[in-house]
């Protein structure tokens, strides 16, 4: 991959919502680039536009105006089916609440995105097994989520996010439901994966968590307040 070319580029992105007779402008002209291998934290007070931005970056929504390029594709105007395909192949998601399927085992949960991409069963099982080992769960392949700690469940979610080798991993308050020890383990894993070249965009309200990133983007009132290189 050419690290000189951005894999995320926002150009004057606005997002507006119509609330009855009132128009709410959640994002007001955001422009920035993210390059392969960066580790970005997104911060700001409640209502600043963090969740709206994450939804746009995750192709769960579209800008009202402006452009969003993911890789070399302009996803700003894509139809729902195309956005869904982009989400499955090019983006990985790690949520605060894990979002695991309780009836499935660890390895089956990791396979879910590959199933929707119609991977052959043998190939998807091999990749899911490898991803489980990569996050330290090689001995837990046949366990169900309720048999795991919170930190282990989040590791399953991270392995699932890695399974399709995405361009970007989006983490939304990924340590919010964990105790401090488990949270540190997950952030250490993020550091390790980022060191291996994975690109992370992490929304967090916690200053200490944000400082684990290499770059901090701070929003206020839908605007880019600051964009700071941390290391």
Image: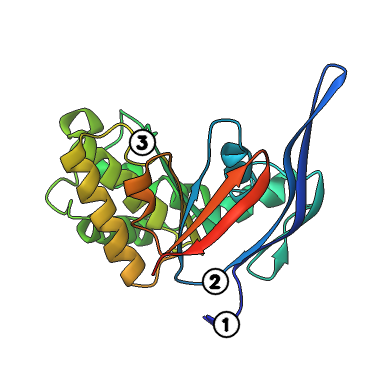
The residue pinned by badge 3 equals 98
Left or right for 228, reference 128: right
The one nearer the camera, 133 or 120, is 133
Left or right for 208, reference 53: left
For the C terminus, the quadrant is: bottom left
Residue at position x 36%, y 55% from top?
211
N-terminal-most mark, 1 or 3: 1
Left or right for 161, reference 24: left
Instruction: Answer above or below: position of 59 versus 49.
Output: below
Q: Residues within 10 Å of mark 1 (few under 14, many from 20)?
A: few
Q: Secondary structure at mark 1?
A: loop
> Looking at this rendering, what residue extends furthest in the left direction?
139
Determine the image quadrant of residue 212. bottom left
Q: Work out how far the residue at label 2 is from the one at label 1, CA to CA, in angstroms.
A: 7 Å
Residue 218 rendering spot, x and y as whole percentages: 54, 49
N-terminal-most mark, 2 or 1: 1
- Is there a contact, CB below 8 Å, between mark 2 and mark 1? yes
The one nearer the camera, 25 or 90, is 25
Q: Total marks drawn? A: 3
Residue 74 rendering spot, x and y as whole percentages: 74, 62
Residue 111 rendering spot, x and y as whole percentages: 37, 49
The residue pinned by badge 1 equals 4
The residue pinned by badge 2 equals 35
Asked if residue 126 can be seen in this view, the reply is no
Q: Secondary structure at mark 2?
A: loop
> Looking at this rendering, what residue extends furthest in the right direction?
21
Asked if residue 41 can be seen in this view, the reply is yes
Residue at position x 34%, y 42% from top?
109
Q: Residues within 10 Å of mark 2 (few under 14, many from 20)?
A: some
Residue at position x 37%, y 31% from top?
97
């Amino acid at each position: 991959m050419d690290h000189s070319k951005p894999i995320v580029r926002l150009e004057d992105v606005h997002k507006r919502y119509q609330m009855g007779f009132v128009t709410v402008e959640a994002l007001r002209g955001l422009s920035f680039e993210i390059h392969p291998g960066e580790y970005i934290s997104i911060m700001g007070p409640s209502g600043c536009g963090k969740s709206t931005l994450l939804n746009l970056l995750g192709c769960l929504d579209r800008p009202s105006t402006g452009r969003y390029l993911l890789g070399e594709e302009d996803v700003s105007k894509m139809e729902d089916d195309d956005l869904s395909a982009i989400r499955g192949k090019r983006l990985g998601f790690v949520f605060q609440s894990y979002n695991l399927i309780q009836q499935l085992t660890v390895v089956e949960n990791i396979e879910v995105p590959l199933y929707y991409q119609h991977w052959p069963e043998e190939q998807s099982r091999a990749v899911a097994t490898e991803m489980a080992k990569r996050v330290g769960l090689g001995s837990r392949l046949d366990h169900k989520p309720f048999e795991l700690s919170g930190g282990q469940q989040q590791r399953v979610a991270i392995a699932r996010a890695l399974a399709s080798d995405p361009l970007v991993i989006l983490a939304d308050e990924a340590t919010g439901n964990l105790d401090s020890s488990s949270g540190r383990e997950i952030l250490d894993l993020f550091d390790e994966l980022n060191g291996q070249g994975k690109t992370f965009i992490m929304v967090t309200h916690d200053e200490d968590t944000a400082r684990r990133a290499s770059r901090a983007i701070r929003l206020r009132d839908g605007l880019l307040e600051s964009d700071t290189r941390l290391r």
